[in-house]
Image (cartoon, grey):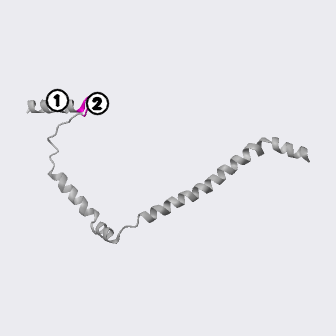
Amino acid sequence: MWKHISNLQKNRTLRYGVPMMLLVVGGSFGLREFTQIRYDAQKIKKKMDPVLEARVTSHTHTNILQEEYTKLKQVDLDNWTNIRGPRPWENSVLNQNEHKTHLTKST
């Protein structure tokens, strides 16, 4: 009988495979529980104050799009200049001042 037990202890499948399978299967069940807690917490956080929710739902998306469209109509998109930002090794204040002086000279 002791011989069979020692043979089972030497068996690589029982020694390494079974604990690995237990970790994989058990881990998936454990992660499912933790993710369910996360989703439940998000549902609780998403509940808004009724007054705030009424304000948000009363303002429809088409009205917002129309407002943004009218703002874009007023912007002059034909006359603009491309301004390069400073590189990480450049001093941004000096670069901005240099660019401002260049713009004032050219106009």
User: Which residue has dot 2 on it?
Assistant: 87
* Part of the protein shown in magenta: 85-92
Most extreme residue toward the top, as rendered? 89
Tell me the kind of residue under disc 1. Glu
In this rendering, the answer to whether 44 lies above or below 7 is below
Tell me the kind of residue under disc 2. Arg
The main secondary structure of the magenta stretch is loop
Q: Determine the residue positioned at 86% across, 46% down.
A: 5
Determine the image quadrant of residue 43: bottom left
Whether residue 7 appears in magenta in the rendering, the answer is: no
Q: Determine the residue positioned at 21% across, 55% down.
A: 69
Q: Residues within 10 Å of mark 1 (few under 14, many from 20)?
A: few
Q: Determine the residue positioned at 58% across, 59% down.
A: 33
Q: Earlier in the sequence, mark 2 or mark 1?
A: 2
Could you tell me which quadrant the C terminus lies in? Answer: top left
Left or right relative to 87: residue 11: right
User: Which residue has dot 1 on it?
Assistant: 98
Percent across and percent down for residue 17 are: 73, 45
